[in-house]
Amino acid sequence: MRSVLMIAGLGLLAACSTPHPDRVTNKPPSLTLTVQLLGPNGELHGTATLAQTGTDTRVRAQVSGLAPGSYAIHLHSVGQCVGPDFKTAGGHFNPTTHQHGKDNPAGPHMGDLPNISVGTDGQGSLDATIAGLQMKGGSAPLLDADGAAVVLHAGPDDYRTDPTGNSGARIACGALVATG
């Protein structure tokens, strides 16, 4: 009897140490990147931090030294920031081929973000989560072979005009590149 109990006890212990199929997950890796948002002459306009957790990415940005008002900020499809116009960053990140803007019935792009409001002190911030955006992993990662960029624009995004939201010139850029 004692042998049967010991064998049963060892079986229970082995069952506890083996992952149950319901507990096994295929979560995407966690990843955090921070970039400086630099103007055409290398002047610092702020920083942006992207953090992937699971299948979502949180974007936090801090800007300073700007005139009061609203400024568009977007994720662009190429990780190059050559001034003065930063056109090397390509268009908005848009793997789903939607039109631009949350107020556009055929939108938004995955690279669309809310505007940043800058106060009289010249500072502003953004904290937004993009559901379904993965920096690495998934079917359309932001950090593909040519990377991506965070681009700050001269004016506010109207959230509907395709392809850019009438947001004006690109005034600062930060290149995101895959590591390891």
Image: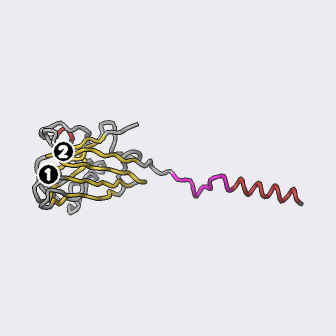
What is the C-alpha distance between the residues marked 1 and 2?
A: 9 Å
Q: Please tell me whether mark 1 sits on a helix, a strand or a loop.
A: loop
Q: Indicate the quadrant containing the C terminus: top left, top right, bottom left or bottom right.
A: top left
Determine whether label 1 and label 2 are within 8 Å by CB. Answer: yes
Please tell me which residue is depicted at 77% across the width and 54% down the height of the picture. Answer: 10
Q: Residue furthest front?
A: 121
Q: Which residue is mark 2?
A: 44
Residue at screen point 21% across, 41% down:
89
Label drawn at residue 123: none
Regarding residue 140, the answer to whether it shows in the image is no
Q: Is residue 96 left or right of residue 115?
A: right
Q: Which residue is mark 1?
A: 65
* Type of amino acid under label 1: Gly
Return the disc, 1 or 2, that comes first in the chain's sequence. Answer: 2
Chain part drawn in magenta = 16-25
**Residue 152, image x and y in percent?**
18, 49
Image point 35% across, 52% down: which residue? 133
